[in-house]
Amino acid sequence: MTDRTDARTNRDERFSGHESFVCRYGWLRHESFVCRYGWLRKLFDAISSDPTIFADEESAILTLGIGKNMVRSIRFWGEAFSLMEGTPTQGYHPTAFSRCLLNEHTGLDPYLEDRNSLWLLHWKIATNANLAAWNVALQDIQDHQFTRKRFLELVYLRGRRGNKELAESTIKQHTDIFLHTYASMNHHYDAQMLDEVIGSPLQELGLLKRSVTDVKDDIFIFDIGPKRGLTTKTFLYALLDYWEKCSSSSKTLSLKEIMFGRLGPGAVFKLSEFDVLQYLDIVEDITDGYLQFLDSADVRSLHMRRETDPSSLKIRLGFDETRS
């Protein structure tokens, strides 16, 4: 069994039954729209002012200044990025994470001007939303490149695994939303599709690129390697978030798990082992010794002091998701 498979098998067992694997979002609740520039700030302000804004769709259209389908889409993206919680009738409220990030006075980046914040949003949607296309692309596909046809096939199989009989058009639209969220635009898209995909902020990450189209199929390529704008603190936040969800009582995390574990930072950020080691080499300094990475012939793992835990360390890093 390979290191990658072994790490994922062990981690899957620990994640068994975790709420992250509960299918909370419909396949097409995003409608035909990727998340656009300005939407998340607009959403945060709207639900902060009026938690029941989505109880009346017509009122939401007027308040947000967008069409009916876009209202449904922006609500979906707010939930998918873990920025709000609640129901249309009982009201939505900003999550602790969104307050930490977007609060106009105390937030880390209220207007999402830093690429580092986009990596945080990528982490949240990849690990919390449980969307089929994201799960397939970031967990199931092992190669650095894939064809559109293969992607469609794998997403279809994941739907079947969940006892869902899905129309081909449903799968295509869902996979297209993922691809258009991350892959850069080019001249092969027609005018209608351009209107649908323009303005996705996560394209700035450069995580996925569309190669020159061959005569048979589109090819998409993941950028495996160092990530521009992904700071050590954000990598550590993701690592601690992962640690908290899958093994909060354990004081050690192996390099294999960090690299290849399902929903782990190595897989979600598409990092090489060298990149991960670059981050881990300085965690002791950044955390004032609360974390220590041991790298020897016998041991390659991250260790946490007994008197702390992942949640406390996230606060020490400046990610206080408990403040109002």
Image (tube, rainbow, N blue to C red):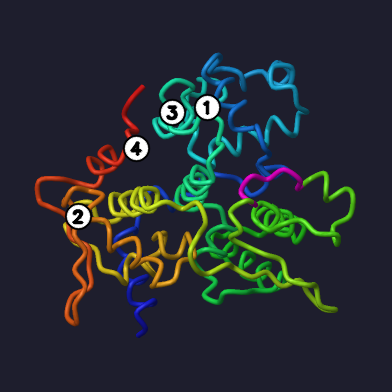
33 versus 38 height, above or below: below
Task: Name the residue carrying label 1.
Answer: 87
State the extent of the magenta-drawn residues as a range.
197-203
Quadrant location of the C terminus? top left
User: Which residue, given by chain and number where applicable, does mark 3 sit on?
Assistant: 107
200 sits left or right of 190 in the view: left
42 is higher (above) or lower (below) than 260: above
Q: Nearer the viewer, residue 98 or 119?
A: 119
Q: Residue at x 64, y 44 (%)?
A: 201
Q: Is residue 170 magenta?
A: no
Residue 284, given in percent of the width and then of the height, sits at: 21, 55
Label 1 secondary element: strand
Label 4 sits on what residue type?
Answer: Phe
Q: How many marks?
A: 4
Q: Position of residue 81 (x, y in %)?
A: 52, 41
Badge 4 density bin: few <14, some 14–19, many ≥20, Cα 10 Å? many
- In the rendered image, which quarter contains the N terminus? bottom left
